[in-house]
Amino acid sequence: MALLAIPAAALTILRSQPVILAVVPFVSIPGYFAWRVARQRPRLATWGFWVAAAVSTISVADFCVYDVSVSGYVAAVLLTLLLVPATVGFGVAWEANVQERADKRAVFGLAPLVVGVLSVLPPSMITTFWPLRVAFLVSRPALNRLADRVEAGERLNRPEWAGVYLILKTKSDRHKGDLALIVDDDPSGKSGFVRLHAPDGNSPLVNLDFDEVMDARWRFQFED
């Protein structure tokens, strides 16, 4: 029953990412194992479900906000492929135990809804990067203030917080004045928020592996 409660967003994700369909038979193994082990063990089902859901959701959200990189993306995908099936498996067992106790949550369909939502959250994050967008919206006023100060000639002498992001340094394009606020100064490839003066502006970052539009002026980019 819990599987029926997974939102229609799951179908959208599968259609937009066909490669996921190819690995479904393999990633279903941990889900089946989790269900088989926990179906007669209510406490294990409860703990297994909530721990798997919490670890997968928090870890993938952290990647989307603070570790947007090729290595971070690979780690988030692997974690999702391992823990989301386990979340579903433990969740189905947990829901069955809730129903057996005639809990009101089962009557109103809350248990299967919880399983469905928590199972869909990690895949939705790595396909749409919505936690990055939420973090940007929260941080945008502070990012704009810092960018204005730098463009006015102020130097960033030490790392400074702008919203939920620690800005390590800045980099600007000398010709058009477009500005990058660096959040990861990895020598192999920097990443950060770039404010452009025009849609066709020249980003101070080069050889981009990732270029996500945040709004009319801001982008999040990381270099190859």
Image (cartoon, rainbow, N blue to C red):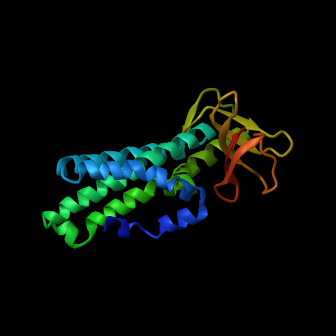
Q: Is residue 107 left or right of residue 156?
A: left
Q: Closer to the camera, 61 or 27? A: 27
Image vertical order of residue 72 relative to residue 156, above or below: below
The quarter of the rendered structure image containing the N terminus is bottom left
Residue drawn 69% across and 27% down?
187
Q: Is residue 162 visible?
A: no
Residue drawn 36% across and 56% down?
88
When asked about the image quadrant of residue 2, the answer is bottom left
Q: Is residue 62 visible?
A: yes
The quarter of the rendered structure image containing the C terminus is top right
Q: Closer to the camera, 148 or 62? A: 62
**Residue 94, horizontal then vertical, whole percent:** 24, 56
Residue drawn 30% across and 65% down?
112
**Residue 10, horizontal then vertical, whole percent:** 48, 64
When asked about the image quadrant of residue 169, the answer is top right
**Residue 219, horizontal then vertical, whole percent:** 68, 51
Q: Is residue 8 left or right of residue 108?
A: right
Q: Closer to the camera, 179 or 18? A: 18
